[in-house]
Amino acid sequence: MAYNLLKGKKGIIFGALNDQSIAWKVAEKANEEGAEFILSNAPAALRMGEIQTLADKCNSIVVPADATNLDDLQAVFETAMERFGGKIDFILHSIGMSPNVRKGIPYDQLNYANFLKTLDISALSLHKMLQVARNLDALNTWGSVVSLTYVASQRTLVGYGDMADAKALLESVTRSFGYIYGRDKKVRINTVSQSPTMTTAGSGIKGMGSLLDFSERMSPLGNATAEECANFCITLFSDLTRKITMQNIFHDGGFSSMGMSARAMDRYEQGAVFED
Ligand SMILES: NC(=O)c1ccc[n+]([C@@H]2O[C@H](COP(=O)([O-])OP(=O)(O)OC[C@H]3O[C@@H](n4cnc5c(N)ncnc54)[C@H](O)[C@@H]3O)[C@@H](O)[C@H]2O)c1
């Protein structure tokens, strides 16, 4: 059911790769809720071809950009402002990648060139987006910026590697820039800390199946799906959440407040063996 929550709003959605992507679901929901937006992803992701299907469905266009490249980002914002004839109202940053995690390199054997890439793609890219937007004065007053994070930024979860550090940095940039952009332009910036979700990025984490099972058992409401995450992002883009900023908001079925649950305990009592 749609509520027209984003009627008249314009935005940029970064990170829709395929129909599993959280950003893909956000784009579908934003379209249903009356928003207009442009889509952006890395040139390599565009070559995989699926994002144009989403653009056609949402009456949108796709602008390629490596989110670590300031010129690319500037071109995305300029294209959006030109297309919409003025400033925009929302940005979704749904971008993450660790070459170390992807190659199965353990946290105590990190390749540092890879580590820098992880940080640049997954965290500095948010700062770069915000700085470009700020310099172009691209966001309307009460605009909203949301990026996706994971609880491993605050609590250690095996297998998440250097992405945990990237997410900690992403959440910190959210607070630091949130102060400046809020103070000067009333723009709000938040992170949504989502349950593990079976997407292309998610499936790159070693033991993802076990993590999904553990997290499902620990969460009183169960894991949040990508679609549920999209619904929540829409509320953060809407005018109903204007005074929420600089927050990391858990959208995880209650996982982050749990220590042990009956359903997780059952697993041990059945004699299940876990990897360390
Ligand atoms: N899937 C999960 O379990 C989960 C849980 C919590 C948070 N998140 C976060 O959600 C966000 C979206 O991930 P997803 O799960 O939808 O997976 P996804 O693989 O569909 O999306 C990741 C996106 O990042 C893009 N990307 C990678 N490098 C880029 C670059 N240099 N420039 C521009 N884009 C680039 C990819 O092309 C892809 O579209 C990520 O920040 C991820 O860390 C995912």
Image: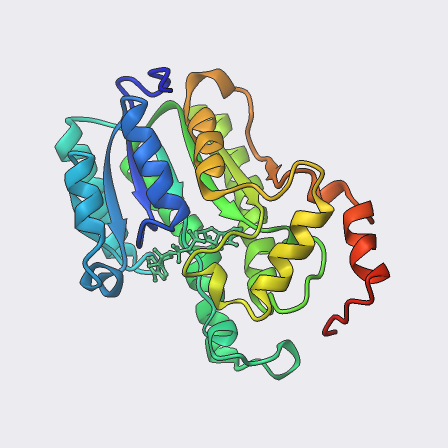
- Relative to residue 185, is residue 208 drawn left or right? right
Q: Position of residue 241 (x, y in %)?
A: 51, 20
- Relative to residue 177, is residue 215 drawn left or right? right
Q: Position of residue 70 (x, y in %)?
A: 29, 55
Q: How many marks?
A: 0
Q: Vertical placement of 265 versus 243: above or below?
A: below
Q: Residue furthest right?
A: 269
Q: Position of residue 107 (x, y in %)?
A: 63, 76
Q: Vertical placement of 168 versus 114: above or below?
A: above
Q: Position of residue 60 (x, y in %)?
A: 17, 37
Between residue 62 and residue 231, name the one nearer to us.
231
Residue at image location 60% in from the left, 44% down from the top = 223
Can see residue 201?
yes
Instruction: State which quadrant residue 8 falls in.
Output: top left
Residue at image location 46% in from the left, 25% down from the top = 235
Q: Vertical placement of 47 versus 191: above or below?
A: below
**Colouring convention used in this rendered image of the protein:** rainbow
Instruction: State which quadrant residue 6 falls in.
Output: top left
Between residue 40 and residue 257, name the one nearer to us.
257
Can see residue 134?
no
Q: Residue furthest front?
A: 270
Residue at image location 38% in from the left, 51% down from the top = 20
| Position of the C terminus by quadrant | bottom right
| Position of the N terminus by quadrant | top left
Q: Vertical placement of 203 versus 4: above or below?
A: below
Residue at image location 63% in from the left, 60% down from the top = 211
Quarter for ligand 1? Answer: bottom left
